Amino acid sequence: IPDCNPAFLVSEMLTNPATGMGFSAGWLDSLQQYSDYCLAAQMLMSPAFTAQKPGRDWITDILDATNTDACWTGEKLRLLPRYEQGLTSSLGTYTPNITPVANVTIDDLIDTGNPYPITVDRIDDEDIPNVYRAEYTDRSSSYNTDIVSVEDEASIVTSGARADNQKSWLWFCRSDYAQWALEQHKHFRRSVRNRYTFILPFRFDMLEVGDLLTITYPLLNLYQWPVRVESIESDETSS
């Protein structure tokens, strides 16, 4: 295989004592799940650092291309693939961790004085692109650049085409790598649209950014609805 596992790239860029960013290896959570995901999905890269920019920007590009979130828990950096189904390929097997650490019910929610103790912000369909394109480097064509594209045809028919900014994923050197990555990018943009905000008592202080929860709140038709913790603000009585 002439390409590299992105998990190795991120680790080297952060922690290599000679060429890395000075990030302590002790601050980096296990990358095993991220590595398994990249191998099983066959999203491998051949990096070429052809421009000068901050290392964090290169890592952001890698995570964007591999549909993965970076979360700082306060102690460690976690990389969380957004893909939540099992995958198997000739390169490996990926088993996502989709076990919730807690189920939040109406009895856990602290009253904020609002009509509902949960605030829901939803991205309107008209604000979500339905045409996606990415540029990649085609090894089978003497490493010339080419374009892959993905469209949501039903959305285009009902509300017209809305193009996302074209991605520059030149470290992908095969069309199938870039195509699969773009499919996952579209799926995430189209399906993850709600943001929930609520206050919990201090007994939930074990929660960390990136943890998976379920919410049960019948008034909003939520029954063990899975959500991932995006941010946490704490005070003396709640978090």
Image: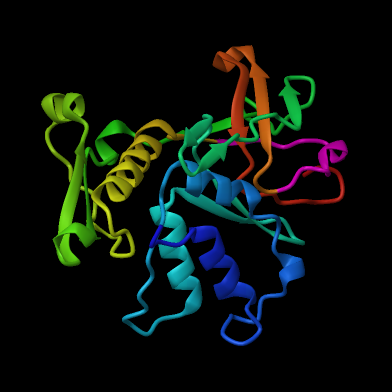
Which is the main secondary structure of the residues drawn in magenta?
loop
Viewer-side residue, 20 vs 152: 20
Q: Residue at x 53, y 30 (%)?
A: 86
Where does the image place residue 142, in percent across and percent down from the top left? Answer: 16, 66
User: Would you say 164 lies left or right of 13 here?
Assistant: left
Quarter where residue 45 is shown: bottom left
Q: Residue at x 40, y 31 (%)?
A: 191
Where does the image place residue 198, in percent across and percent down from the top left? Answer: 66, 35
Where does the image place residue 66, in percent across and percent down from the top left? Answer: 43, 51
Image: 2 above or below 24? above
Q: Is residue 200 magenta?
A: yes
Q: Residue at x 15, y 24 (%)?
A: 158
Image: 232 above or below 7? above
The colour scheme of the drawn protein is: rainbow
Where does the image place residue 69, in percent across and percent down from the top left? Answer: 53, 51
Q: Is residue 181 magenta?
A: no
Is residue 115 visible to us here?
no
User: Would you say 28 lies left or right of 176 here?
Assistant: right
Image: 73 above or below 110? below
Q: Which residues are magenta?
A: 196-208
User: Would you say 140 lies left or right of 227 here?
Assistant: left
User: Would you say 210 lies left or right of 109 here?
Assistant: left
Is residue 118 visible to us here?
yes
Quarter where residue 50 is shown: bottom left
Pick the quarter of the image with the N terminus: bottom left
